[in-house]
Image (cartoon, helix red, strand yellow):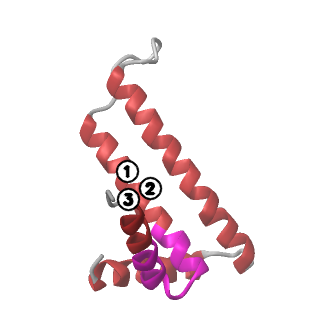
Amino acid sequence: MDADTWETVDRLVAWLDAESTLAPDVELLLRLMKVSEETGEVAQAVIGVLGQNPRKGFTHTWDDVDSELCDVILTAMVALRTRNADAAKVLNTRLAAVASRSRAS
Protein backbone atom coordinates (compact mmCIF):
# COMPACT_ATOMS: atom_id res chain seq x y z
CA MET A 1 0.00 0.00 0.00
CA ASP A 2 1.26 3.43 -0.77
CA ALA A 3 1.17 6.39 1.61
CA ASP A 4 -1.76 7.98 -0.22
CA THR A 5 -3.90 4.94 0.53
CA TRP A 6 -3.20 5.13 4.25
CA GLU A 7 -3.73 8.91 4.21
CA THR A 8 -7.18 8.28 2.75
CA VAL A 9 -7.87 5.65 5.41
CA ASP A 10 -6.76 8.14 8.08
CA ARG A 11 -9.18 10.75 6.70
CA LEU A 12 -12.01 8.20 6.71
CA VAL A 13 -11.24 7.20 10.30
CA ALA A 14 -11.14 10.86 11.36
CA TRP A 15 -14.48 11.50 9.64
CA LEU A 16 -16.09 8.43 11.21
CA ASP A 17 -14.70 9.39 14.63
CA ALA A 18 -16.06 12.92 14.29
CA GLU A 19 -19.53 11.63 13.36
CA SER A 20 -19.69 8.98 16.07
CA THR A 21 -21.67 9.49 19.25
CA LEU A 22 -20.46 6.20 20.72
CA ALA A 23 -17.68 5.46 23.17
CA PRO A 24 -14.44 4.62 21.36
CA ASP A 25 -14.46 0.98 22.50
CA VAL A 26 -17.99 0.50 21.18
CA GLU A 27 -17.12 2.24 17.92
CA LEU A 28 -14.14 -0.10 17.48
CA LEU A 29 -16.32 -3.17 18.05
CA LEU A 30 -18.82 -1.96 15.46
CA ARG A 31 -16.06 -1.32 12.92
CA LEU A 32 -14.75 -4.83 13.50
CA MET A 33 -18.24 -6.27 12.99
CA LYS A 34 -18.64 -4.17 9.84
CA VAL A 35 -15.95 -6.34 8.22
CA SER A 36 -18.27 -9.35 8.58
CA GLU A 37 -21.17 -7.40 7.11
CA GLU A 38 -19.11 -6.47 4.07
CA THR A 39 -17.95 -10.08 3.70
CA GLY A 40 -21.58 -11.13 3.59
CA GLU A 41 -22.12 -8.69 0.74
CA VAL A 42 -19.36 -10.47 -1.21
CA ALA A 43 -21.22 -13.75 -0.69
CA GLN A 44 -24.48 -12.14 -1.76
CA ALA A 45 -22.85 -10.83 -4.93
CA VAL A 46 -21.37 -14.24 -5.79
CA ILE A 47 -24.78 -15.85 -5.26
CA GLY A 48 -26.22 -13.18 -7.57
CA VAL A 49 -23.57 -13.82 -10.23
CA LEU A 50 -24.37 -17.53 -10.20
CA GLY A 51 -28.13 -17.03 -10.01
CA GLN A 52 -28.35 -19.30 -6.99
CA ASN A 53 -31.34 -17.59 -5.41
CA PRO A 54 -34.31 -18.89 -7.42
CA ARG A 55 -36.49 -16.04 -6.19
CA LYS A 56 -34.07 -13.35 -7.42
CA GLY A 57 -32.19 -14.99 -10.29
CA PHE A 58 -29.07 -13.36 -11.74
CA THR A 59 -28.65 -10.05 -9.91
CA HIS A 60 -24.92 -9.25 -9.89
CA THR A 61 -21.84 -9.21 -12.10
CA TRP A 62 -18.25 -10.16 -11.37
CA ASP A 63 -17.52 -6.42 -11.31
CA ASP A 64 -19.98 -6.20 -8.41
CA VAL A 65 -18.02 -8.94 -6.64
CA ASP A 66 -14.80 -6.97 -7.19
CA SER A 67 -16.40 -3.84 -5.72
CA GLU A 68 -17.61 -5.76 -2.69
CA LEU A 69 -14.14 -7.25 -2.19
CA CYS A 70 -12.70 -3.73 -2.24
CA ASP A 71 -15.26 -2.74 0.40
CA VAL A 72 -14.05 -5.62 2.60
CA ILE A 73 -10.43 -4.52 2.22
CA LEU A 74 -11.21 -0.87 2.92
CA THR A 75 -13.43 -1.70 5.88
CA ALA A 76 -10.72 -3.92 7.34
CA MET A 77 -8.15 -1.17 6.88
CA VAL A 78 -10.41 1.31 8.69
CA ALA A 79 -10.93 -1.19 11.52
CA LEU A 80 -7.20 -1.89 11.77
CA ARG A 81 -6.35 1.82 11.78
CA THR A 82 -9.01 2.43 14.43
CA ARG A 83 -7.42 -0.25 16.60
CA ASN A 84 -3.78 0.51 15.90
CA ALA A 85 -2.26 3.88 15.03
CA ASP A 86 0.58 2.08 13.22
CA ALA A 87 -1.75 0.11 10.95
CA ALA A 88 0.47 0.40 7.87
CA LYS A 89 3.41 -1.17 9.69
CA VAL A 90 1.18 -3.90 11.13
CA LEU A 91 -0.16 -4.77 7.68
CA ASN A 92 3.26 -4.72 6.04
CA THR A 93 4.70 -6.94 8.77
CA ARG A 94 1.83 -9.39 8.43
CA LEU A 95 2.08 -9.39 4.64
CA ALA A 96 5.80 -10.17 4.85
CA ALA A 97 5.16 -13.03 7.29
CA VAL A 98 2.46 -14.58 5.10
CA ALA A 99 4.58 -14.18 1.97
CA SER A 100 7.55 -15.80 3.70
CA ARG A 101 5.46 -18.75 4.88
CA SER A 102 3.97 -19.33 1.47
CA ARG A 103 7.21 -19.68 -0.46
CA ALA A 104 7.89 -23.15 -1.81
CA SER A 105 10.86 -24.79 -0.09
Quarter of the image containing the N terminus? bottom left
Q: How crowded is mark 1: few (under 14 residues within 10 Å), some or many (20 or more)?
A: some
Residue at the (46%, 72%) spot, across then down: 94
In the image, residue 28 lies in the stretch drawn in magenta: no
**Residue 51, located in which quarter of the rendered image?**
top left
Closer to the chain start, of discs 3 and 2, is: 2
Q: In the image, which disc is placed on residue 102?
A: 3
**Distance from Cα at disc 3 to Cα at disc 1:** 22 Å
Name above or below for residue 14 compared with residue 40: below
34 above or below 31?
above
- Can you give x and y, in whole percent of width and height, for residue 10 in the image? 43, 83
Distance from disc 1 to disc 2, alpha carbons, whole Å, reads 5 Å
Q: Distance between the residues labelled 3 and 2?
A: 23 Å
Amino acid at the residue labelled 1? Leu
Q: Tag 2: Cα neighbours inside 10 Å, few (<14), some, or many (≥20)?
A: many
Task: Please provide the residue range marked out in magenta.
Answer: 77-94
Residue 85 lies in the magenta-colored region: yes
Q: How crowded is mark 3: few (under 14 residues within 10 Å), some or many (20 or more)?
A: few
Secondary-structure class at tag 2: helix
What amino acid type is highlighted by mark number 3? Ser
- The outermost residue toward the top is 54
Nearer the camera: disc 3 or disc 2: 3
Q: Do the residues labelled 1 and 2 touch (CB within 8 Å)?
A: yes
Residue drawn at (47%, 13%), measured in percent from left and top? Answer: 55
Where residue 18 sits in the image (x, y, percent)?
Answer: 57, 82
Q: Hey, what amino acid is under mark 2?
A: Val
Instruction: Read off the residue under disc 1.
Output: 69
Q: Which mark is residue 72?
A: 2
Query: Which picture quadrant has residue 46?
Result: top left
